[in-house]
Image (spheres, coloured by chain):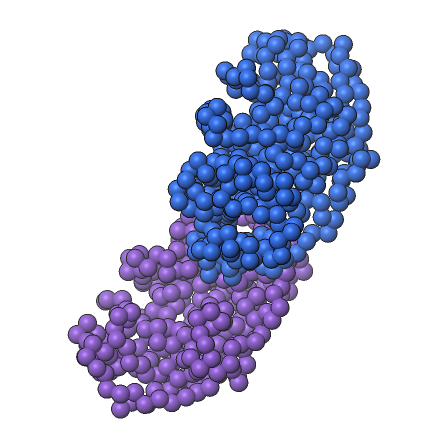
Chain colours: A blue, B purple
């Protein structure tokens, strides 16, 4: 018998999440049945998508959704022997019983000197999101100019570095000077703090006077309308996130962009990485390769203690993290 | 010496165009020089794009932009003999001197029993727009469901009929009951008057409970946000026009649609037919073929008299026309 701590959504978020929307509960887990494994979480992930998806995919009383890297501590499933590591989508739980059906082993040959927490970041879902956004949605070409916002986040940092690997010019926007300094370290050609620049329009124009071929959109809201005006003709926009709107109680509004889309003949596409699931193993290998070559630097913002998950989640939504926000149990 | 009547934009439109924004002027045209032809307009076109493009492509004092079908009445250019017919972009003029460089002969073998005014409509720019929107932007497939708004207009009528030729279900929105009746005649599966339906959301859901694969957008504004919610996952949106916003003095605003685009993984693309100019001859042949087979019905809203062009233009912007708005000199 194992005691599992869980974080339960006891009240649907109304505006910015509050401590009281979450409740820490303890469950007794029975022994695994045939086919099942018992998992112990090592690292857990907090990601922006959890905020909007909580409304669609959860009801009050559910354990918060999310991914974790876990160790198999009991197994009645030969595919997942005791001691092996997996990425599971069991949510915010220290221990889980899992039937193995949707369980993914951590990449085979994961190097011993690389923290497995990266399987939740640059060599996991956010990294996959960056690759597919760039390759499948934007079809970014060598020599093109890319704009990415929330650029110091889990996805944005990978986006910018891959674009540099592909020989592109990269302009990144972030919300603190420390983040901007980090983007410069990562090799971004231009980076700015959107909170302190006077005019977003001006800074975008100055960073790339000839405009932008591609825009990797993580933020949404008013800044998106400004960015659209700076696109080149036939510009492409990958809509990955809209973090600036996730906590709205009444939706923010902005000018309709149809005419801009027509005159510039822009293409805009929303996407989720799961669409290219069949490519995940090959893509993760490439990400690990770039990491081992030093071309993909990974920074994490680590919160210690499972009990601090809601705080880590809320901090991430407020932009406290540089790089991937991770919880170490 | 020929006298040319012209309509000049004397004041940039501010909100809905006013009679006083236009001025009828008369010019004396000299004899054509070597390489030039003298054209006499037979039919002129008024189209929605003229409203927004007047701001980008014209200055006060310019002759209004636009296409016409004209007859060559004097020629010093062997490519365009006297008596031949052309589509010219000389704007709102009864007579023009043209150097032939951007002049397009009316489709070769234009049947004698087909009005050449169609070269400004279904077998011209609006028809080309419909084809490229459907084939190049939406890549509409047999069996899919298409939504088109401003469906009784020059582009919308062709869009709906081509979608039917391709074996699709077509839902059309228009602004009068007479237009709706016409759409039914054209074979639209569902058509409704957006001005009298209670809830757009409800009527869209009822017309296609399973949602829409494709949306041919001619209108923009608030209705676009409602339509987006009714798209199927991986839905495609061709942004062709935004007539509901063209006369705004302050831009209309609406809720940002990023989250909808992400969750449904929608693709949205703005376009203009000129992108596929290299395909025009082949496409016009197909349009004429469909017309001759009776699969593409063409209705025109004809205004007689060059002096009535501003009124015809303003009437078209208000939705007075069913089918293509044409001016017969």
- Please name whichever residue, A258 or B287, is drawn nearer the observer in this view of the structure: A258
Report the number of numbered marks: 0
Quadrant in the picture for residue B130: bottom left
The residue lying at 45 percent from left, 47 percent from top is: A145
Quadrant in the picture for residue A82: top right
Residue B112, can we see it? no
Residue B254, can we see it? yes
Work out which residue is located at the far right of the displayed protein and give it: A20
Quadrant in the picture for residue A165: top left
User: Position of A3 compared to B315: left or right?
Assistant: right
Question: x and y percent of residue B172 in the render?
Answer: 52, 58
On-image quarter of the C terminus of chain A: top right
The residue lying at 44 percent from left, 55 percent from top is: A210
Question: x and y percent of residue B221 in the render?
Answer: 59, 61
On-image quarter of the N terminus of chain A: top right
User: Position of B198 compared to B301: left or right?
Assistant: right
The residue lying at 52 percent from left, 72 percent from top is: B317
- Please name whichever residue, B32 or A286, is drawn nearer the observer in this view of the structure: A286
Work out which residue is located at the far left of the displayed protein and give it: B78
- A250 in relation to A111, above or below: below
- Please name whichever residue, A11 or A216, is drawn nearer the observer in this view of the structure: A216
Question: x and y percent of residue A268 in the render?
Answer: 50, 49
The residue lying at 43 percent from left, 42 percent from top is: A168
- A191 in relation to B201, above or below: above
């Amino acid at each position: 018998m194992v005691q599992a701590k869980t974080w339960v959504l006891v009240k649907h978020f109304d505006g910015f999440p509050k401590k009281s929307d979450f409740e820490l509960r303890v469950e007794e887990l029975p022994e695994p049945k045939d086919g099942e494994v018992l998992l112990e979480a090592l690292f857990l992930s907090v990601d922006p998508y959890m905020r909007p998806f909580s409304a669609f995919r959860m009801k009050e009383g559910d354990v918060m959704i999310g991914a974790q890297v876990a160790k198999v501590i009991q197994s009645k499933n030969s595919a997942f022997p005791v001691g092996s590591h997996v990425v599971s989508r069991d949510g915010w739980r220290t221990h889980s019983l899992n039937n193995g059906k949707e369980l993914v082993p951590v990449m085979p040959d994961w190097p011993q000197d690389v923290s497995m927490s990266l399987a939740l970041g640059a060599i996991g879902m956010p990294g996959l999101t960056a690759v597919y956004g760039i390759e499948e949605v934007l079809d970014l070409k060598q020599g093109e100019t890319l704009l990415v916002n929330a650029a110091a986040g889990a996805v944005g940092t990978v986006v910018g570095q891959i674009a540099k690997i592909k020989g592109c010019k990269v302009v990144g926007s972030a919300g603190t000077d420390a983040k901007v300094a980090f983007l410069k370290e990562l090799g971004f050609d231009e980076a700015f703090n959107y909170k302190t620049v006077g005019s977003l329009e001006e800074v975008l124009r100055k960073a790339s006077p000839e405009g932008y071929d591609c825009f990797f959109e993580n933020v949404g809201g008013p800044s998106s309308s400004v960015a659209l005006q700076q696109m080149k003709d036939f510009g492409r926009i990958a809509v990955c996130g809209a973090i600036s709107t996730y906590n709205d109680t009444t939706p923010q509004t902005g000018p309709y962009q149809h005419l801009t889309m027509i005159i510039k003949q822009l293409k805009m596409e929303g996407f989720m990485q799961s669409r290219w699931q069949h490519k995940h193993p090959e893509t993760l290998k490439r990400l690990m390769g770039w990491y081992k070559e030093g071309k993909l630097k990974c920074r994490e913002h680590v919160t210690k203690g499972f009990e601090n998950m809601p705080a880590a989640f809320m901090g991430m939504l407020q932009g406290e993290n540089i790089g991937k926000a991770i919880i170490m149990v």
